[in-house]
Image: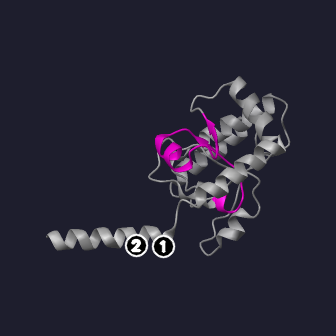
Amino acid sequence: MVAGFYPHKGHFKVLKLARMFLDLGFDNFKFFFRGSHVYTSYVEDLKKEIVELGLQNFVEFEPFISKITLDEIYSKFDLVILLSEYEGFGLPVLEAQSYSIPVACSGIEIFREVLQESVFYLSPDFNRNDIEDFVKQICNQEILDEKIKKGLNNVKRFSWYEMSHDTLSLYKLFTKKV
């Protein structure tokens, strides 16, 4: 999970997901939380919840390093998950796709707009059946390969050059009318 430690990012939902994995007998996983510790009390609450749920061996906090490349961040992940309640855009999930990493995320409107059918969507109030289905999918290499392919195609829709060009054009248009 690549996200700053903000309450709306869904860290506690990831812990619920991890606990459900274990309850289903799926114990070959480790979740990594990576991001700046914006709200230290939130991070402390997460750490307490990890202990209460017995997830100490399955959840790890990566140290926040300000000077790190995207390649260094994403090279160690097999799947990126982001269960946000809301987002402005969701750049980490696109970054993951650009590194051929499958993505699982909440089905919020912005993710559906940006990611379309290139990811695994998890309902905010997922249940045992949802997670059983999700585990089956992420353990199926054909399905993962298809999500990776769709993700790489999805990323092609976005370009920093095009975005900056379009933004500059809007600024020029707006300043002409003022």
In the image, the segment drawn in magenta is 96-122
Local secondary structure at mark 2: helix
Count of number-bearing discs:
2
Horizontal placement of 63 versus 9: left or right?
right
How much space separates mark 1 and mark 2, taking CA atoms? Answer: 6 Å
Please say if the residues under marks 1 and 2 sit with CB atoms less than 8 Å apart: yes
Quick one: label 2, few (<14), some, or many (20+) residues within 10 Å? few
Q: Amino acid at mark 2?
A: His
- Residues 70 and 166: in front is 166
Residue drawn at the location 51% of the way across and 54% of the way down = 39
Residue drawn at the location 65% of the way across and 53% of the way down = 151
Q: Is residue 138 above or below residue 95?
A: above
Q: Position of residue 140 (x, y in %)?
A: 83, 40
Q: Amino acid at mark 1?
A: Tyr
- Residues 55 and 98: in front is 98
- Residues 31 and 170: in front is 170
- Residues 42 and 91: in front is 91
Local secondary structure at mark 1: helix
Q: Residue 57 lies in magenta, yes or no?
A: no
- Quarter holding residue 2: bottom right
What residue did someone put label 2 on?
165
- Answer whether residue 54 is visible to the viewer in this image: no
What residue did someone put label 1 on?
161
- Answer whether residue 164 is visible to the viewer in this image: yes
Quick one: label 1, few (<14), some, or many (20+) residues within 10 Å? few
Residue drawn at the location 71% of the way across and 23% of the way down = 129
- Quarter holding residue 136: top right
Model colouring: one colour
Horizontal placement of 157 versus 76: left or right?
left
Q: Is residue 17 above or below residue 172?
A: above
Q: Residue 116 lies in magenta, yes or no?
A: yes
